[in-house]
Amino acid sequence: MITLTPPAIAEAKRLIEKQNQPNLALRVGVKEGGCSGFSYALEFDTTKEGDQTFDYDGIKVITDQKSFMYLDGLTLDFVDNLTGRGFKFDNPNAKRGCGCGSSFSV
């Protein structure tokens, strides 16, 4: 399961409204690369066959089967403070991460 915190839900809603395409979902994925081996990927997309789908207060979160192996248990948060603004990944499957927080190894 992938979980979104209330701040992440609010930011995703804001961004989808800005796109003016209410059928979009937040795709959370993993791709090879980054300084630790894998990088997180976020984009707005539509559901494809085989996707895992989760709903949080009207925000649909989708991920493909391959990415879900690495993201099961992930909590996606959104922070906006003096040290930065953006989505933050808390992945219990990550054995090691980098300083930027956008890549990990398993």
Image (tube, rainbow, N blue to C red):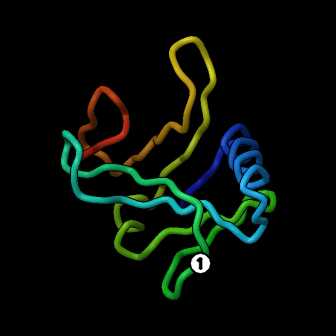
Residue 47: give x, y in percent of width and height.
Answer: 59, 78
In the rendered image, the quadrant that contains the N terminus is bottom right
Foreground residue among 42 and 101: 42
- Does residue 1 appear in the picture of this structure? no
Q: Going 73% across and 58% down the picture, which residue do you hit? A: 56
Indicate whether 53 appears above or below 28: below
Instruction: State the image coordinates of residue 4 (x, y, percent, origin top left).
Output: 63, 49
- Residue 74 place in picture, x, y as percent: 48, 51
Measuring 31% from the left and 49% from the top, which residue is drawn there? 39
Residue located farthest toward the bottom when viewing the structure as drawn = 49
Does 7 appear above or below 40?
Answer: above
Q: Is residue 76 left or right of residue 22?
A: left
Residue at point 23% right, 44% down? Answer: 34
Bin the neighbour count of mark 1 within 10 Å (Cα to Cα): few under 14, some 14-19, many 20 and up.
some
Q: Amino acid at mark 1?
A: Thr
Across and down, in percent, residue 15 comes to 70, 48
The correct choice, above or below, for 79 with respect to 10 in the image is above
Would you name the residue on which mark 1 appears?
A: 47
Q: Residue furthest top?
A: 82
Residue 42 visible in the shown view:
yes
Which secondary structure, mark 1? loop
